[in-house]
Image (spheres, rainbow, N blue to C red):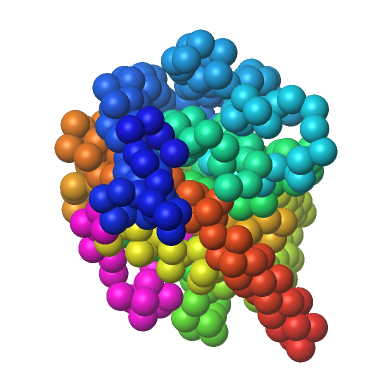
Amino acid sequence: MRPGVERSVEGGACDGRSELELVKLRAAECIDEAAERLGALSRAIWSQPELAYEEHHAHRVLTHFFEREPPTASWAVQPHYQLPTAFRAEWEPPEARAPSAAPRPLHLGFLCEYDALPGIGHACGHNLIAEVGAAAALGVRGALEGLPRPPSPVKVIVLGTPAEEDGGGKIDLIEAGAFTNLDVVFMAHPSQENAAYLPDMAEHDVTVKYYGKASHSAAYPWEGLNALDAAVLAYNNLSVFRQQMKPTWRVHGIIKNGGVKPNIIPSYSELIYYFRAPSMKELQVLTKKAEDCFRAAALASGCTVEIKSGAHDYYNVLPNKSLWKAYMENGRKLGIEFISEDTMLNGPSGSTDFGNVTFVVPGIHPYFHIGSNALNHTEQYTEAAGSQEAQFYTLRTAKALAMTALDVIFKPELLERIREDFKLKLQEEQFVNALE
């Protein structure tokens, strides 16, 4: 119990509020007390956008933040954790650090993202994701520091996860064992509305290269094999295929290279495509059909084709209803107005490497309004993500995450329900895949 709060006989507080309510209040106060530092952290990341795996400035800003966060040395920071621009910061109560026969601590993870988009900077608000993760972790630490002893041993872990926009840094970290022994993970993503969950889709990306034969376009075009024709045919094949796609499937791509000069038959062309579907099983079906379209274009044009998959597939995000219901309850107390459950489960969504995380550990990835109606991945959203107005909504979301983490710590029955939801969703996913 923090100083100045007396326990009642029933284990609550003298003013009628429970210990958990007071601890949540203290978490929110700690976030408010750090608001200026957190805002500066976010602005430093926003002002110097960096692409996937190249987030050296953002990485330095975040690691210095935790290394210098008062009280000094309260966070144990591993600055280059498994990846050059990843990090891990840990905190646990002092008494938990001494060797003892105490049970294994509950490991709660808070994730930070900080990569940007090419050309338009932080148009997905990853500077705010980094701020939310840092703020929520600070709130939980500050709340627990005021207690003589937490109800159960706890370790707070902040993971800096690079390369969400391209590559899948969280998947690299999963493969390196970074999520081993984590019990629950938390993060939040900026959007246009407040949603405790959105059905983010599984995603697979490919680079398609066509190789033809150069020739003079006017003098003897019949000697050439037009790789640009192959690319255009592939693009049109997929456009025609859309009529037979399921409404929940998404296909989008660009022609990255289509030749060098009109009077030279293009000997090389290149396309990049993303495929998305509600599940990994459906994604495999969609990918197979799309690859048939690419190969048909090669056959028709006489070119050869090379299809190269991206480093990682992004899995669909598994929902954890017990976790997002607790988050909504805390959010509503802070004034957050959530979209309806029907809208939440049937609304538009993208893809994230957090989906892969939800297949190895229970987690929550809510979306939050930042005070703007601008759409993600636009110049307008870049401006909104760097605005002062976004700070109120970002820190409010961090408070809701911190309060939900405290629920997990103080309510063993909630943790059990979260674990059961996780197991059930994994089983459902495996069952559906087996049927298909």
Position of residue 420 in the picture relative to residue 414 (left or right) = right
Q: Position of residue 396 (x, y in %)?
A: 29, 45
Q: Residue furthest front?
A: 9
Q: Give me the residue at 69% from left, 60% from top.
A: 359
User: In which quadrant is the N terminus drawn?
Assistant: top left
Q: Position of residue 92 (x, y in %)?
A: 61, 31
Q: Give me the residue at 36% from left, 41% from top.
A: 6
Q: Give me the residue at 57% from left, 37% from top.
A: 149
Q: Nearer the viewer, residue 421 or 387?
A: 421
Position of residue 326 in the picture relative to residue 194 (left or right) = right
- Vertical comparison of 357 with 156: above or below: below
Q: Residue furthest bottom?
A: 435
Label the magenta part by its dominant secondary structure: loop
Position of residue 132 in the picture relative to residue 288 (left or right) = left
55 is within the stretch colored magenta: no
Q: Position of residue 230 (x, y in %)?
A: 62, 58
Quadrant hosting residue 358: bottom right
User: In which quadrant is the C terminus drawn?
Assistant: bottom right
Q: Nearer the viewer, residue 428 or 275?
A: 428
- Vertical comparison of 49 with 70: above or below: below
Quadrant hosting residue 347: bottom left
Q: Give me the residue at 47% from left, 81% from top.
A: 247
Q: Is residue 37 visible?
A: yes
339 is within the stretch colored magenta: yes
- Vertical comparison of 413 with 103: above or below: below
Q: Position of residue 354 (x, y in %)?
A: 58, 52
Quadrant hosting residue 215: top right
Q: Nearer the viewer, residue 415 or 170?
A: 415
Magenta range is: 333-350
